[in-house]
Image: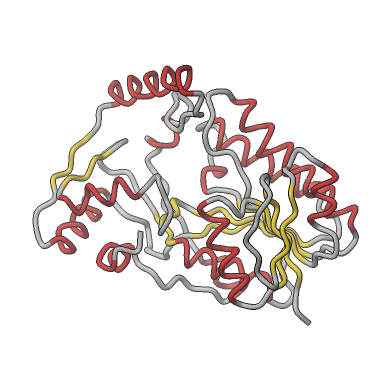
Amino acid sequence: MTLTVAITGVTGFIGRHILDNLLARGFNVRGLTRSARADTVHNLTWVQGSLESPAALSELIHGADVVIHCAGQVRGHREEIFTDCNVAGSVRLMQAACDGGSCRRFLFMSSLAARHPELSWYAHSKYVAEQKLIAMSSDIVLGIFRPTAVYGPGDKELKPVFDWLLRGVLPRVGTPDARLSFLHVSDLADAVCQWLTVRDPVSRSYEVCDGLQDGYSWDRLREIGSRVRRGPVRLIGIPLPLLKLLSQLSGLSYRVTGTEPMLTRSKLGELTHPDWSASNQSLSECIGWTPKVSLEHALRARLF
């Protein structure tokens, strides 16, 4: 039997790749969209609405066996902006799934940042959303993915860093001995689809990364960049006072343009945290998934 999957966040970077993967594998998909869509695919149904609309969410999950919740707020100048979307929106979607009666699995795309909710408004909102969904899930199997820094075609956050790296400059934020981890979006999309079809899944959270044990150091990133570009890479530390100044300027820019800032004083806690290493062990044991794309391969093949 072909599964019907309801998905939010399909216009976002991660959501678009998951949607394409689902369609390529033949799933019937119902996608939530704020604006009317003219593009049509035989196994894709668009549902117009947003996380703020219980009626739209009820329509979205109608007849769905699985819900994938990718929509989320990653930018904002106030904590309430993250809470309204990441917490309240997630609760409304789970309530719709519980009321609909057909949903058997619910996958919440959280973040590795939820491991440290004290670091930022974003991290706290993801952590609180996880706890509320766990309390509500009842007979629905709840999977929580906590991916690390995700990159790939269409990503706007890490691409500039990789572009500079391949030009011979690597800007470093945080301490020199910090540990980082990365994940190519194609591997994340494969993990999602594998979780949908694995037999007898259990409700739990999973870290998701590219599998490099203990993560990347800044020196290792510099070495990878040097090998790929066949030339030296200069590692340049960005002082915390400068980051604070840039966050203030970002806030001023919001007042002028109205575009929610990514770099805020709240976000600095995430950027300068010393340990973002992760492990796929639990996920691999539960669904048999392993990542295929290493960061070095992605840089060589320009898969970003």
Q: Nearer the viewer, residue 180 or 19?
A: 19
42 relative to 158, above or below:
below
Percent position (x, y) of residue 68? 68, 58
| Left or right: 85, with 98 as reference point | left
Q: Residue at x 15, y 58 (%)?
A: 226
70 relative to 82, above or below:
below
Q: How is the image coloured?
A: secondary structure
Percent position (x, y) of residue 237? 21, 35
Total marks placed: 0
7 relative to 275, above or below:
below
| Left or right: 186, with 31 as reference point | left
Percent position (x, y) of residue 107? 68, 58
Q: Residue at x 39, y 36 (%)?
A: 271
Q: Quadrant of the C terminus?
A: bottom left
Percent position (x, y) of residue 179? 35, 48
Q: Quadrant of the N terminus?
A: bottom right
Q: Nearer the viewer, residue 206 or 160?
A: 160
Q: Quadrant of residue 227?
A: bottom left
Q: Quadrant of residue 66?
A: bottom right
| Left or right: 202, with 206 as reference point | right
Q: Residue at x 75, y 74 (%)?
A: 3
Q: Name the outermost residue toward the front.
A: 38
| Left or right: 100, with 183 as reference point | right
Q: Name the outermost residue toward the bottom.
A: 1
